[in-house]
Amino acid sequence: MKQSAEKKQLHVRNRHRGQYDFTALIQTHRPLARFVNLNQYGDLSIDFSDPAAVIELNRALLHHFYQIEHWSIPAGFLCPPVPGRADYIHYLADLLAEDYPHGVPRHLNVLDIGCGANCIYPLIGHREYGWRFTGSEINAQAMKAAHAIIAANPGLSQAIRLRWQKEENAIFQGIFHKNERYHATLCNPPFHASAEQAQQGSQRKLRNLGLEAQSPLNFGGQQDELWCDGGEKAFVCRMIAESVQYARQCIWFTALVSRKENLPELRNALMLTQACDVRVVEMAQGQKQSRFIAWSFLDKTTRERQMSR
């Protein structure tokens, strides 16, 4: 029952609280069946160290809960944990609801910085709340894969558009168009500061799974997904500095922060921008503690007025 207890910590609207119902998932997505067996506790499960099994579980979850019938990522790209990604969407919805008098807002415009080959945030956010997404991406192969997912699922092309980030060191520049407005941005920034650090992190994950160092990873990840110079802290600081240029074009800027020790420096960076409101939204996904930082250059009255439009 450990898995069930951990997943109850997910957001109250998260569809993935409690144990996976593998019987129901298989009824929706038959290819999952060959990966499902009884585990040591006598429950149906998969081998979470098997990359093929994890990808098939993701396909089943996206098909069963979000009506995404066709989803695929290139070999070696990041395979995201669907429950955790959904949590970010739901907590972001709660933040936006604070400035909206009619409950959780629907049909908003959201910018996903680095949507990746998996396009996971736009898929979940659109199906849950009807949000319209712009996804930026710097990796050509990831862009091609995300385009393929959108094209393969009817209706998504009207809800999700992708934009190529031409500048290696830019985040919002070139993605925000003139007179374009968003209710929020979200981002899962590169976590590591170097390729070596990313490799060490991968080896730790393998050890935690009880696997040999040469075993394939069930989570994958490319350079743009896993590391950048200065790591997560430097990336989010760049986001903060760039966001000032687009202060009136977005209500809330947000980014995941995996390392809690990075928060003081990020807060200091935001103080220098004179942001009107800064939040740290804590999330718990099992034993993993996660959070996102959010900032707005608009006062509450202005945010409420723009949300009501």
Image: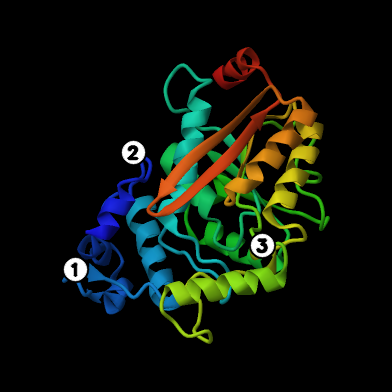
- Residue plotted at (64% across, 63% down): 225
User: Would residue 138 be seen by someone viewing this image from the given angle?
Assistant: yes
Which circle marks residue 246 in the picture?
A: none
Asked if residue 290 is positioned above or below residue 141 in the image, the reply reads above
Tell me the kind of residue under disc 1.
Answer: Asp
Closer to us: mark 3 or mark 1? 3
Question: Quick one: 172 or 275, which is closer to the camera?
Answer: 275
Seen from this angle, which residue lies furthest top? Answer: 301
Applied colour scheme: rainbow
Q: Quadrant of residue 230?
A: bottom right
Q: What whole-number distance in Å separates the C-alpha atoms at marks 3 and 1?
A: 35 Å
Question: Quick one: 271 or 188, which is closer to the camera?
Answer: 271
Residue that carries the numbered disc 2 in the rendered image: 12
- Residue plotted at (77% across, 46% down): 238
Closer to us: mark 3 or mark 2? 3
For the C terminus, give its image quadrant.
top right
Tell me the kind of residue under disc 3.
Answer: His
- Residue plotted at (73% across, 61% down): 228
Asked if residue 279 is positioned above or below residue 236 in the image, the reply reads above
Asked if residue 191 is positioned above or below residue 262 in the image, the reply reads below
Residue that carries the numbered disc 1 in the rendered image: 43
User: Would residue 183 be seen by someone viewing this image from the given angle?
Assistant: no
**Of label 1 and label 2, which has the lower sequence position?**
2
